Image (cartoon, helix red, strand yellow):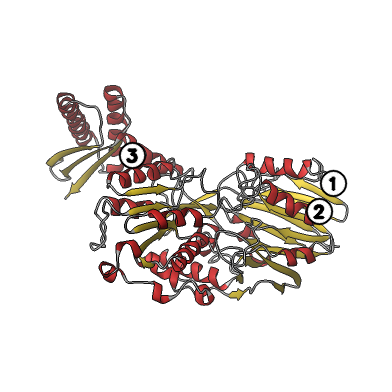
Amino acid sequence: MDKIKILALGGLDEDGKDLYIIEINDDIFVIGAGFKYPTKNTPGIDFIIANFDYLKNNKDRVKAYILPKGKENSFGALPYIIQEVPAPVYCTKLTSIYLDLFTKFRQIKYEYDYHFVSLPAELEIADHKMIFFSTCASMPSTFGICIKTDLGNIVYSGDFIVEYANNKYFKLDLNTLGKISENPTCVLLGESVCATKPGYCSPSHKIYNHLESQFKSAPGRIFVALSSDNLYHIDEVFRACAEHNKKICLYDDTSKWIYNLKKYEENPYFNSKNIVPIEDILRIKDQDLVILLSDSGDKIYDKISLLANGENEEKQVRLGENDTFFIGCPANDNNEVIATSTIDEVYKSGCHVYYLTRKSLGKMHAYEEDIKMLLSLLKPKYYFPIEGYYVNLLENAKLAYDMRIGLTHRNIFLLDNGHSLLIDEKGASVDFNTSGNVPFGEVMIDGIGVGDVVNEIISERTRLSEDGVAVFGLAISSKERKIIAGPDVQMRGFLFLKDKEADIMLKEMTNIFITMVEKWLETTKDFDTKKIEEQITTTIAKYLLRGSNRNPVVKPNIIVIE
């Protein structure tokens, strides 16, 4: 009989960083390899991925990476992991396009061993039979997975909502799920992001009706700003434009490449006759024109802000009082501050603003009734809530318990990253990683560096943003043992200091700097500048903390000239 081990290196009790591992006997399958966006407590960080030492320690057992969706925050860790732990990648063609673009953008050179999944599909990977079924999510061709074992099916729900749409790219494949349910489900890994929300997600996730109301009432051009990783919404924009005889302009390169994705070849709404280049928009009546802006993460707000302030590179596009700005990318917990500031700037531009908030536009993740539908269909022997903060995981578990389908505190498992769910013919148990055999945690990605950013650097960046920096410099002669140039002292980022107070502090810091260097020159026999610079840093930092109640970064620099 098979022995099963399921664990998460990321994705539990957090937003993003999903990385789930399913082990069947000696084979390891990795589902997702995501990242999470930085917060205000991690300045200068591009994103954060899961510690993948466990995969490195078991690299010979890793048989495949399975990428269920084409969002960069769902596969963004893979370019860093796969270089050290190579294995085939199973995904749709669309996801591969996104992954290649992301990899190139991050200046990483790697040729992926792709195995494309055409949904629905039944594949055999490392002698294990798997069924891939499409789900309805913000990206087209998102899928869930069923892995057949001697103990029953292991089902990973993927991101999903219940929607009976005609668009084959955004559709929950109930037919395939029905066939899967004909055999026992050993364990279900079900998403929890929106488990606290009552009812079904659909139709709260749609923007079409909001767009239509603006198409009917807008006096001039309509600017539409959307997240580039929500192609469901972008598809709605093209459909609305086609049905209301609107011309659409793709604002910049980030927006243009969306149209070139092969996924759209069969979409009747993506008619090239409806698209006009930005150079020709002045030839189109304002009432007939829609301008689409798209980008990922915070970058969409940067783009909106530049346009609102008239600082955008596309000089032929300027906001006017007859324009309408439709913002369909609500802020999340990590970028609420920048989003609020950006929207305020759009209002100041004088144009009409239509902003969809998180309350008016639902996330495309399973709500309570969506989750109940999947549970009632599959009736799993064990349930493992995944994806989301603890409150979401807990609410998901409560939903399963309240359904009275045999799921109780004995077979619903709320785990943390690093904990393992072990299943064999005797039953299920949890390894709470007390032996520490599963390393887990976070790895910071800064530029093209992986894990180079440590807590000390994060702390220094935080101090820079809050308290500023004081920089000191001079040159000494090793032969004459004296200062021959300087000192030069610069302060940046100090707040609430009057000119007189600043002048006094500047003079005192300069005196401390000179005195310590001169004493060092009189008493030292070597010229190890690192030691004296550390002493200067400590002394001046203490003085500034007493004098201004601030803790800036202090950077002395002593140059030795022969």
**Label 1: few (<14), some or many (≥20) within 10 Å?**
some
Q: Are marks 1 and 3 in contact (CB under 8 Å)?
A: no
- What residue sits right under mark 1 in the picture? 406
273 or 175, nearer to the observer = 273
**Label 3: few (<14), some or many (≥20) within 10 Å?**
few
- On screen, 27 above or below 187? below
Residue 210 placement (x, y as % from top left): 47, 53
| Amino acid type assigned to the residue bearing label 2 in the image | Lys
Q: Name the element at disc 2.
A: loop
553 or 155, nearer to the observer = 155
Disc 1 to disc 3, C-alpha distance: 53 Å
| Amino acid type assigned to the residue bearing label 1 in the image | Gly
Disc 1 to disc 2, C-alpha distance: 8 Å
Frontmost of labels 1 and 3 is 1
Q: Earlier in the sequence, mark 2 or mark 3?
A: 2
The numbered dot on residue 465 is 3
> Which quadrant of the structure image shows residue 133?
bottom right
Residue extending farthest to the front is: 216
Q: Name the element at disc 1.
A: loop
499 or 195, nearer to the observer = 195
Residue 389 placement (x, y as % from top left): 60, 42
Residue 195 placement (x, y as % from top left): 65, 45
- What residue sits right under mark 2 in the picture? 379
Look at the image and tell me in which quarter the N terminus lies: bottom right
Q: Earlier in the sequence, mark 1 or mark 2?
A: 2
Figure label count: 3
The numbered dot on residue 436 is none
Give the residue drawn at x 43%, y 45%: 335
**Label 2: few (<14), some or many (≥20) within 10 Å?**
many
